[in-house]
Amino acid sequence: MTEYNFAYLDEQTKRMIRRAILKGLAIPGYQVPFASREMPMPYGWGTGGVQVSAAVLTPEDRFKVIDQGADDTTNAVSIRSFFERTAGVATTTATSEATVIQTRHRIPEDPLSEGQILVYQVPIPEPLRFLEPRESETRKMHELEEYGLMHVKLYEDISRHGHIATSYAYPVKVEGRYVMDPSPIPKFDNPKLSDSAAIQLFGAGREQRIYALPPHTQVVSLDFDDHPFEASKADHPCALCGAENTYLDEVITDDAGGRMFVCSDTDFCERRRAGQLAGEMTQARSFTLTPAQADGSDASGGSTTAQRRRTS
Amino acid sequence: MTPLLSVAGVTKRYGANIGCADVAFDLYPGEVMGIVGESGSGKSTLLNCLAGHLAPDSGAVIFDTRADGPRDTLLMSEPERRMLGRTDWAFVHQHARDGLRMGVSAGGNVGERLMAVGARHYGDIRSTATEWLGRVEIDAGRVDDRPTTFSGGMQQRLQIARNLVTGPRLVYMDEPTGGLDVSVQARLLDLMRGLVRDMGLSAIIVTHDLAVVRLLADRLMVMKDGHVVETGLTDQVLDDPQHSYSQLLVSSVLQV
């Protein structure tokens, strides 16, 4: 494409965003304001992440986009094709082959390595926002490290639900200094934030903030002494690949209570199955459609989905 | 004896208008001082200057800190002053809504100051909060209810519990009984008198209600147009006012 500058944004804008990123990396967890641009997609679709990706992409990069762990959902497909068209970079779905990964709501199951950049799409960068509506006040609280209020939120959780019910966007403290919203990733992923070999960048387009975690940053999830942080997940193995320790999506397979739990990280799950690992859905059922399955008269949604996934 | 709070020459101007001018007094540990005066006489401005909410144009507010002895709070750094604001100082607002988090349960409201100074044990925080609700006569069963479901008097008592939970030594109160009906006022005053005596608190109470200072305050300061016009022991000022404005104030109280 010659109509666009490389990766859509003009070079001055990218410089501005890179300055914000560098400042963010220098002060881990600190929200750096930046002049967010209008992007050819609505707010809430990842405009912050797209701008950060555009600023860090080079022609040699291999780009991967995941949305809730999947490479094949609307958001992931459209952002991937956006950069295919405007930057002409190579794309991949394999986590280990990608150099830049833009993500919404998940951290890949595979440990990231040095040289990789993980870009998060962030809707609300301010962890204190729903506790303290005034921006002037939240900035002062960050400045003075007054984070008692964050624990009030967790206290409220326990008093109402008996345990810390916050299950995503779970607040973390970075290097013992800034409290940070890790974007709406499940708290299962929180431990992966800490001491990651990859650079982690967070972009909030509507709120015009960028923040970052340099490699091997210490990130601690907030908790109480008698209610420690717990990285929770659905208590099942993956129905497709049998993995025991991955974050799972619950998929409703029929209207009679049938459901299956599958890895939300599709790349991880597919590679495991390609390596002949199988879960209950892929073991128990044959892959030829019987007439009964074909007309959908039993709980066959799971296996036909599995089959389609496998053959695609 | 070192005064707990020593105020000298505090002046705050709003442009050409005077907020309060050249106020000076000493407050000793365990002493309760009332500041009375009509609306616009500078009482609240003075209180906000003392509590660090407003920066006075000149003067000194010297507080006897636990660690370093007497220090001018106006020369402290912002973090130090705010730390003081949630440990040794407490501020009771006239409207409980200004001092409470209305979206957070009663227990969370009381626990916030504890968590702000580093408490990280849920069970301990909760039991302390429950104990304090008892001390301000709120049923322990309402620890998980939001203040929006409380009556005005209960909200005010909750605000007091929330402020006193960290064991402050100095409490600023801005019209603590304003907007409450008289029977609720009476109970609140009774409660505050008990707490102040039990905990040996020092307090500065701003009010226009002379009955409140008669009950609570040891000493009285009468303000008019930003200036202190009369000071003295409460009974002395109320029973034998010397300044013409004090005489007007005392004679204006309706007798039932």
Image (tube, grey):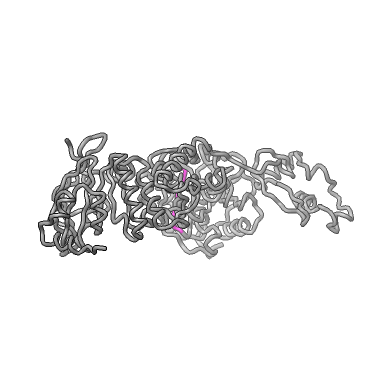
The residue depicted at 17 percent of the width and 56 percent of the height is: B222
- Report whether residue A100 is seen: no
Q: Nearer the viewer, residue A25 or A165?
A: A165
Q: Nearer the viewer, residue A169 or A240?
A: A169
Q: Position of residue B188 (x, y in %)?
A: 35, 52
Looking at the image, the residue that sits furthest to the front is: B256
**Is B237 on the left-hand or right-hand side of A160?**
left
Q: Is residue A260 magenta?
A: no
**Is B169 on the left-hand or right-hand side of B100?**
left
Q: Quadrant of residue B178?
A: bottom left
Q: Position of residue B118 (x, y in %)?
A: 40, 38
Q: Nearer the viewer, residue A137 or A120?
A: A137
The residue depicted at 64 percent of the width and 49 percent of the height is: A93
- Please report the bounds of the magenta region as a residue range: A207-213
Q: Main secondary structure of the magenta part?
A: strand
Q: How many marks?
A: 0
The residue depicted at 61 percent of the width and 59 percent of the height is: A78
Q: Position of residue B220 (x, y in %)?
A: 18, 51
Q: Quadrant of the N terminus of chain A?
A: bottom right
- Report whether residue A8 is seen: yes
Looking at the image, the residue that sits furthest to the right is: A291
Q: Position of residue A203 (x, y in %)?
A: 48, 53
